[in-house]
Image (spheres, rainbow, N blue to C red):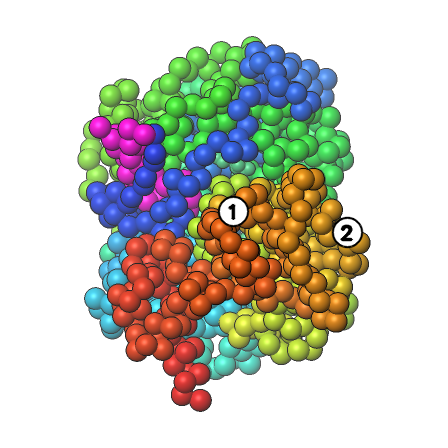
Amino acid sequence: MPVETKTTCPYCGVGCGVIATVANTGTVTVKGDPEHPANLGRLCSKGSALAETIDLDGRLLYPEIGGKRADWDTALDLVAAKFSQTIAEHGPDSVAFYVSGQLLTEDYYLANKLMKGFIGSANIDTNSRLCMASSVAGHRRAFGSDTVPGTYEDLELADLVILTGSNLAWCHPVLYQRLAAAKTARPDMKIVVIDPRRTMTCDIADLHLAIRPDGDVALFLGLLAHLAKSPALNPDYVTAHTQGFGAAVSAAAMLSMPALTERTGLTPEELQRFFHLFETTEKTVTCYSQGVNQSSSGTDKVNAIINCHLATGRIGRPGMGPFSLTGQPNAMGGREVGGLANMLAAHMAIENPEDRDRVQRFWASPTIATKPGQKAVDMFKAVADGRIKALWIMATNPVVSMPDADAVRAAIEACPFVVVSDILRETDTTLHAHVLLPSLGWGEKDGTVTNSERRVSRQRSFLASPGEAKADWWQVAEIARRMGFDGFAYTTPVQIFAEHAALSAFENDGSRDFDIGAYADMDATAYGELKPFQWPQPTGRVRQETRFFADGGFYHADNKARFIAVEAPVETDRRDARYPLTLNTGRIRDHWHTMTRTGKSARLSAHIAEPFAEFHPRDAMDIGLRPADLVKLESPHGTVITRVLVSERQARGDVFVPMHWNDQFAATARIDTLVSPLTDPVSGQPAAKNVAIAARRFEAEVYGFAVSSAKPVALSADYWAIAKAEGGWRAELAFQEPVEDWTRWCRAAFGISAGIEPLGYADRQSGEQRLAFFDGERLLATIFLSRQPVAVARNWAVGQLQSPHFDLRKRFAIIAGRPGADQPDPGATVCSCYLIGVNRIISAIRGGCHSVEAVGRETNAGTNCGSCRAEIRGIIDGCLAAAAE
Ligand SMILES: Nc1nc2c(c(=O)[nH]1)N[C@H]1C(S)=C(S)[C@@H](COP(=O)(O)OP(=O)(O)OC[C@H]3O[C@@H](n4cnc5c(=O)[nH]c(N)nc54)[C@H](O)[C@@H]3O)O[C@H]1N2
Ligand SMILES: Nc1nc2c(c(=O)[nH]1)N[C@H]1C(S)=C(S)[C@@H](COP(=O)(O)OP(=O)(O)OC[C@H]3O[C@@H](n4cnc5c(=O)[nH]c(N)nc54)[C@H](O)[C@@H]3O)O[C@H]1N2
Ligand code: SF4
Ligand SMILES: [Mo]
């Protein structure tokens, strides 16, 4: 009998319920859980492809010391001894943990407990510093607590949904689908997208405000000044439940209309339309994500938004409120346990002596950190200059994802003792560890995560633990014990969860927002059966209403919220003559962060198979870039090379580059090597979306494209990017000088044995060359080389890896680089569920399918997870516009 397990998707903060089924054969399939309140059965492209990412290829299965396999006892003893010794010699602040919103709550709780309560330092920070820190800081300034007041349902109930700095269609796809469905059901609902780029999310927008980078504070100040003079102002709410309104409005009123248009880059008409919509729509939700948080004015952006909701009293009621969208599956859980360097535990404050005393008594711990620890960027600076001498990195890949990434790599390389807990053996970060600890991954580990709407769900294991991999919480507990600390005698995650729940209720009595005391007595059976629930859930009361602040009740001492009198930053334009463009970085639909998991899926890799930089057509022209060229991007911190994408979605002067590519998938594409370590002064969050750079064409003598059944290794090329493909791999290549012996080059790159001679074709005049290597009827590898970017049909070429080549004619078709009439080129993949390419969609449109639904009926594209529906609509619009010209 196939076995079904209910668990939670390990990617984004939507936190969708997943049913994983393991067949008798061991094959795993996944589908959306119709009973999970976050997704009600839906999954996006990444969630649907989860089963393709759980193989053991590349997994770290045993502890390693200095690159050699070790047993757990030796590895754990070494880590414990090194940490203890460093602390003994240099004090508690000489060690640090750098952890992750992808840890389970139980892992996170223990790491925080060990560092803050037992080691006695607050040097534990997390990749959430790069992600949610500005929202946390903004919430705490306004509400006195880090509270997300609303629920997902509010997006469906609202009459106006504002998405600012959020590419919801690609980054929170199931929430986007819920919103899109609500708008279809109630077409009067209005959606505004505020983003310098015209993203796929704009597909459902009534208004897109292409704001200047970091124009958000000015925009929401303008809105506050407007609201203050309008009937939308809620004086009763302001008087009863807030403080500081006058000062905030005075600060806001200082911006004249010309100053507003200048700072936001928007026309007075656009501004008025937005202000009017907000003013006249009671049920308004403002969602924000990294375009807000990842900024040198990130915390002010958050407060500028919250100010407008406080002024109108639109908070905590159905369909109303500010809504911070969390990124990672357990960003919210990490905040609950206090995993940030400036927090304590269970939403208590490290600066507050009573809170410190309370937590210490609860933990019965020998000490408690008395001051905030180093925030991520400062933490790696302290590693670099030797103040931190022992570092433990868990479930994050800072050599890729931290700003000034080369400096971070150098700091890690120079650190006397680095431990990395990961699921993969080779990442850009694991390569520099002294000790590697193998962790359990999704499907193997057990615990809880909390999504953006404060809903706690179980991640359950349905796969056996591979090799000697162990849960992250187990690793922390073992090392704590070996460092001689009591209080870590856990044998199962439920014990940790129950303790975490008990701490949330400990001496709480409503004084703290985070309270899940109802779960403090949890036993293994109840934990096994735990259904998703939203907090707060205090002891003894079943709370139906989980929204916050409709009737005030804020967590400052006087129970009032604070308006923050923020000021628009004077200068947000960082460009100069040497670095005349603004780099904006972010995500694409089908990859997750540093690709350690999504990079394993051929389907997901087919959507966008190469790092790219997206330019406005005029900028591309000015720089001399044509579509499909390569471009070199530079900042004072580093250099990357990517493909050029020219598109009108991009604003002039801005360049967008995805954050995902790294040294495992490309030659020089770690975009964070360019990002400066500039941070928000309040939250310490890096400004990853506004970086001054220069761009110039990368001059290549030879361009190449290859497919190979084996993973390409040691590619000696000036530019390369590899991606998993059905039946093998694909590689984009470029060389500044021609290679003398291409056959030899291919043998080394694709692992082809000496006995196998290639079929070849070369045209001296055009410089075109092709080679194909066969083992019997099976294609091993083929390479296409040209003086121009190679024009061969990618998906067709990839398809050749899996089709037999009986006769010479078929083999020659490959080096001719042309699909036969029987195998039309499907074009770049749009729908990753059914692998439908753009050419197939265009031919359906030409055949009369003029709606997404019609294209779906004809081709299946867009009919499963729906993540590509916005793109299909874009292709339809493009075709119809072209036909009309
Ligand atoms: N497919 C996919 N989904 C993901 C992830 C992933 O890796 N892949 N990661 C998850 C994580 S951890 C996170 S944090 C979220 C992030 O989710 P999002 O924040 O939605 O994603 P980003 O692409 O980082 O940035 C959002 C948008 O901010 C815009 N922006 C840039 N500068 C400004 C500005 O000054 N003002 C405004 N208003 N907008 C600006 C960018 O153009 C971009 O479109 O996604 C989560 N979901
Ligand atoms: N330029 C730029 N930089 C950014 C951003 C941006 O928008 N622009 N966004 C920032 C944001 S919001 C985020 S959240 C970060 C994300 O950046 P990272 O956290 O660095 O990215 P991930 O690839 O998610 O790294 C997770 C690591 O944990 C491993 N892993 C997976 N599961 C487990 C597990 O169960 N246990 C353990 N121990 N390891 C596991 C994975 O193999 C991987 O190596 O990037 C930030 N950096
Ligand atoms: S929206 Fe997609 S990535 Fe996010 S939790 Fe749901 S299935 Fe996973
Ligand atoms: Mo994130």
- Splitting the image into 4 quarters, where does residue 109 fall? top left
What residue type is disc 2 on? Asp
Residue appearing at x 67%, y 24% in the figure:
67
Q: Is residue 556 visible?
A: no
Query: In the drawing, does residue 529 fall left or right of residue 239?
Result: left
* Residue 561 coordinates in the image, percent (x, y): 39, 51
**Vertical side of 561 occupied by 884: above or below:** below
Distance Cα–Cα, label 2 vs label 1: 25 Å
Q: Which mark is residue 741?
A: 2
Disc 2 to disc 1: CB gap under 8 Å: no
Secondary structure beneath dot 1 equals loop
Query: In the drawing, does residue 35 fall left or right of residue 166?
Result: left
Residue appearing at x 68%, y 68% in the figure:
788
Question: Does label 2 point to a residue whose CB lies under 8 Å from ligand 2?
Answer: no
Mark 2 nearby-residue class (10 Å; few <14, some 14–19, many ≥20): few
Q: Is residue 412 visible?
A: yes
* Residue 631 coordinates in the image, percent (x, y): 68, 64
Q: What residue does disc 1 label?
A: 777
* N-terminal-most mark, 2 or 1: 2
Query: In the drawing, does residue 467 fall left or right of residue 174?
Result: right
Depth check, front residue: 816 or 715: 816
Depth check, front residue: 509 or 148: 148
